[in-house]
Structures are given as C-alpha cells and as structure tokens.
Image: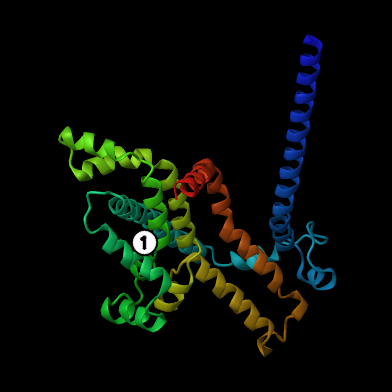
C-alpha cells in the first residue's frame, strides 16, 4: 500500500514537472515572438538605407550605419527640449489625472452618495456619444483660448470614462465599513480618501497611472491641432513626426537632386524615431509591471 502511494506521488511530481516545463517553454517562446518586432525595428534603425532597399528589413544590420540617428539628433537642443516638454506634460498629467480619476471612482461607488447614479450616467453616456472634432476644437481654441498653450495637450487627457469605470470597480472591493469606522473616529471624507483609500488602491493606481502616462507620452494629435509650428519646443511625438515628414519631402522633391535617393534614410529614420520614442517607456515599465498585472486581475474579478 505504501509503495503504491509512493508511485502515485512520483507520477504526480513527474506530471507537475512536465506541465511546468511545457508552460515555461511556451511562455518563453511566446515572449521571444513578441520581442522579434522590437529587435527588427532596432536592427533596421542601424542599417544603411541602400541595404534596406535591396534586402528588406533584417534583425541584424548587414551594413551598420548610424546615419538615421545622426539626422534625428541633428539638432540636439530641439530634441532635448521636446523630451523635456513631453516628460513634464506626462508627469504633471499623470499625477493630476490619477488624483482626479481615483477621487471620482471612489465617490461614485460610495452608497451614501445620493447623486452617484446620475453622474455615472453622464460619464457612461460619453463612451457612446461625443460632440465631435469641430466643437472640441472650438472649445479649446476659441472659448478657453488655449491655442499655442501646453494646457491644450494636458487638460483633455486628465480624465477618461474607461479609467473612471476601472477605478470604480476596484474601489468596490474595499469594504465600506472602513469608511464608516473612520468617520466614527472623526475623520473627514478627504482624510479617509487620502490616508485609507489611496494606500489600499495601489495596484489600481499603478495600472491607471500607466494608461494615463502612455496616453500623454504618445500624444501628438492634440498637439498638432493646437500647437503651431512657431513654438520652439513641441511634444516629442510631434517633433519626430515632423522629422520623418521632412525626410519624406526631401526624398520626393527636386530638392534632393544632389543627393542619391537611395541614401536618404527614410525607412531607417522611421525605425530610429520609434526607438527614441519608446526607449523611456520600456525602461519604466518593469517597475510597475507587477502592479499593472495585479490591478488588471482584480478589476476583472471585481467588475
């Protein structure tokens, strides 16, 4: 009898080891497949343009060249300024947006807030219908007077109905008894929110903060609408878009008559700008990854 138990235990351990090994191998292979596009972009950014025209994109550059990066960083003052503008907008917008979204989501799930259903309806309504581009442009440009102002990029991204719904779903998992006991002890609503709710909502804050930060970091459309070319420093994405547009214009105009068309690094410049734009995000993401996964899981279960 004891031998049978031992044999079953050995078979169970072997099965568990096989399943784990298969899982690790599958996840490793899947991760490598996800990494291939980034390696392709990185390798192409260091490839000579004529080799891209001849042989296409490659993971490893056949003829190594940094010409694309030289053009992108041709004016380091402008790109550093664009980085500073983007980082500033991202940091300020993420902090303010996190605070506003968290406060709104927490208030909408409190059972003692009588107007929560009415306000929730207006928030949900905006996910189905919007005013359109023209009213939005008139609001920012004419009524608020934010033309050539960084606030035109900052303000529209502060709050999102999707993020408010996510925060509301997460804060439902926090027992309302905590709020009631803190009120009995004499704490006000704002004190409860800052000292009790926010520390317990760290996974949701990290998840929502990552969404807000990525939105601001990749923002170029509002900047294109409201920030004119007269501004010296514009957000990074719009600046890099201008660099690619200029190279494309040079390649397709008579102004490039003195330069062989194959030597204009248009394709490698596209890849170089992608690396320049995504580099800081890739470095920042590992620090919030565990909170991001936890926040998504909790939101899915509680929602």
Q: Is residue 20 left or right of residue 128?
A: right
Please state which of residues 105 and 215 is positioned toward the viewer in this rendering.
Answer: 105
Considering only vertical position in the picture, is 117 above or below 263?
above
Q: How many marks?
A: 1
Q: Looking at the picture, how far across and down is residue 172, in whole percent?
A: 36, 46
Q: Is residue 229 left or right of residue 199?
A: right
Q: Is residue 167 left or right of residue 214?
A: left
The residue positioned 38% from the left and 84% from the top of the image is 134
Considering only vertical position in the picture, is 272 above or below 266?
above
Q: Is residue 53 left or right of residue 35?
A: right
Q: Residue furthest top?
A: 2
Residue that label 1 marks: 159
The quadrant holding residue 256 is: bottom right
Please state which of residues 56 and 198 is positioned toward the viewer in this rendering.
Answer: 198
The residue positioned 44% from the left and 59% from the top of the image is 84
Q: Looking at the picture, how far across and down is residue 45, in whole percent?
A: 70, 62
The quadrant holding residue 70 is: bottom right
Please state which of residues 281 and 269 is positioned toward the viewer in this rendering.
Answer: 281
Quadrant of the frame with the N terminus: top right
Figure coloring: rainbow
Please state which of residues 1 and 84 is positioned toward the viewer in this rendering.
Answer: 1
Q: Residue furthest left?
A: 186
The quadrant holding residue 97 is: bottom left
In terms of secondary structure, where does tag 1 sit?
Answer: loop
Q: Looking at the picture, how far across and down is residue 301, in whole percent?
A: 49, 46
Considering only vertical position in the picture, is 222 above or below 66?
below
Would residue 230 be seen by someone viewing this image from the given angle?
no
Would residue 243 be seen by someone viewing this image from the given angle?
yes
């Amino acid at each position: 009898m004891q031998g049978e138990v031992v044999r079953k235990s050995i078979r169970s351990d072997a099965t568990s080891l096989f399943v784990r090994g298969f899982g690790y191998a599958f996840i490793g292979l899947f991760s490598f497949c996800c990494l291939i596009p980034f390696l392709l972009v990185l390798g192409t950014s260091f490839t000579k343009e004529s080799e891209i025209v001849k042989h296409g994109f490659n993971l490893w550059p056949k003829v190594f060249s940094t010409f694309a990066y030289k053009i992108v960083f041709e004016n380091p003052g402008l790109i550093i300024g664009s980085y500073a503008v983007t980082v500033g907008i991202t940091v300020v917008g993420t902090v303010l947006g996190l605070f506003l979204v968290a406060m709104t989501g927490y208030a909408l799930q409190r059972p003692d807030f009588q107007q929560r259903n009415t306000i929730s309806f207006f928030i949900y309504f905006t996910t189905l219908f919007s005013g359109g581009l023209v009213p939005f442009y008139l609001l920012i440009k004419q009524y608020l007077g934010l033309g050539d102002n960084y606030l035109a990029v900052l303000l529209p991204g502060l709050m999102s109905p999707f993020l408010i719904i996510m925060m509301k779903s997460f804060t439902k998992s926090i027992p309302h008894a905590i709020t009631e006991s803190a009120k009995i002890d004499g704490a006000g609503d704002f004190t409860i929110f800052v000292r009790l709710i926010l520390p317990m909502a760290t996974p949701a804050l990290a998840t929502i903060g990552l969404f807000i930060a990525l939105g601001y970091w990749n923002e170029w459309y509002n900047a294109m609408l409201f920030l004119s070319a007269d501004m010296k420093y514009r957000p990074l994405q719009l600046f890099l878009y201008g660099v690619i547009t200029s190279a494309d214009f040079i390649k397709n105009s008579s102004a490039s008559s003195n330069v062989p068309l194959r030597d204009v690094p248009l394709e490698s410049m596209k890849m170089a700008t992608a690396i320049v734009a995504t580099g800081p995000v890739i470095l920042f993401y590992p620090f919030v990854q565990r909170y991001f996964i936890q926040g998504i899981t909790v939101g899915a279960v509680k929602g």
